Image (tube, helix red, strand yellow):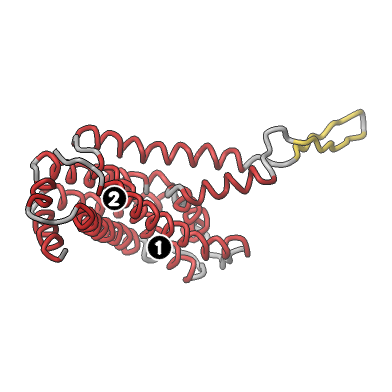
Amino acid sequence: MMKLLRAGFRRTCKNLLFWLGLGAALLCGVIAALLTRASGYLDDMVILPFFIILAAVISLMIGTEHSDGAMRNKIISGHTKGNVFLSQLIVYLVFAFVAAALYLGAFSIFMIGHVGAFPTYALIVSAIGFLLVSLSYTVILATLSMMISQKAVSAVICLLLVVATVLSIYAIDDALAQREFIYMEIEMGECSYTINEPNPRYIGGAARRTMEFIRNIIPYGPTLQYMDMVSPAFRPWDVTLTLSAEEANLLAILPMYSITESALIGAIGWLCFRKKELK
């Protein structure tokens, strides 16, 4: 296993795409900070490019391993498929961690002096949550890339997957944002009446709990929720802000979703790769 890891890190560090990916992550952090300083609002569009970078770099680099025959050669030299999968996964988890740290580091440095009074632990936990989300995406993307031998196909599928998670979370958030009642004010002469009508688009009960679970398990869902919680810290007015009980509870449970998802998908990928025929 150690030989696989050393060879994997050595091969990765010699790949120009690896360094371009880290440079792009650093640049994205700088641009995200500058845009946030200018608008006073943390928009998810400044974070989305980072996940696209992860998808592109991971899929193309693993695709190159397939096309060069490096994956097959590791098996021929006596390594098990399970160890090959784990070594590759560890290498790209380290890449994602470094890239996310560069992104957060650049963002934090350029935001010095532009953060209002806000609970420090919320900012720290949100940053940790972002790192965990990045690792979740990495496990998913690396597993798909390991299972798909064609580099071009793997890259397209990984990029589409990131876009699909974003669009699905937008749709879920829109559905959950619907109010239970529609308030209408009717004026009749000098009198006015307020009528509360049930909103047919409102989702409640078990269906709502299911959608909230899906939003938490899809990596982009926690990302938006972290952003919604900490975004007030970057607004121009200097006021003391606090978290609601619901937000504090979310900060406690959302990291667990990312950790559980990463472990589950990693285990499934390990089992599936052991049965894959390498060409």
Relative height, residue 178 to residue 241 (above, below): above
Estimate the x, y position of residue 48 in percent, counting from the top left. 36, 45
- Residue position marked by numbered label 2 in the rendering: 28
Q: Answer left or right for 102 relative to 202.
A: left
Within 10 Å of disc 1 (Cα), the crowding (few <14, some 14-19, many 20+) is some
Q: Is residue 58 above or below residue 199?
A: below
Residue in the picture at 55% in, 42% down: 173
How packed mark 2 is, by other alpha carbons closer than 10 Å (few <14, some 14-19, many 20 or more), is many
Disc 1 residue type (three-letter): Ala
**Residue 278 in sight:** yes
Q: What residue is shown with label 1?
A: 127
Marks 1 and 2 close (CB-CB < 8 Å): no
Secondary structure of the residue carrying numbered label 1: helix
Residue type beneath disc 2: Cys
Residue 190 occupies quadrant: top right
- Across and down, in percent, residue 105 comes to 30, 63
Mark 1 or mark 2: which is in front?
A: 1
Q: Position of residue 273 (x, y in %)?
A: 26, 47
Name the side, left or right, on which 139 lies relative to 12. Answer: right
Q: Secondary structure at mark 2?
A: helix
Q: Quadrant of the C terminus?
A: top left
The disc at residue 104 is: none
Q: Please report the residue visible at 62 percent of the width from the left and 63 percent of the height from the top.
A: 244
Instruction: Identify which residue, 218 or 71, lies in the foreground.
Output: 71
Mark 1 vs mark 2, CA separation in Å:
16 Å
**Residue at the limit of the structure toward the right, as seen here:** 190
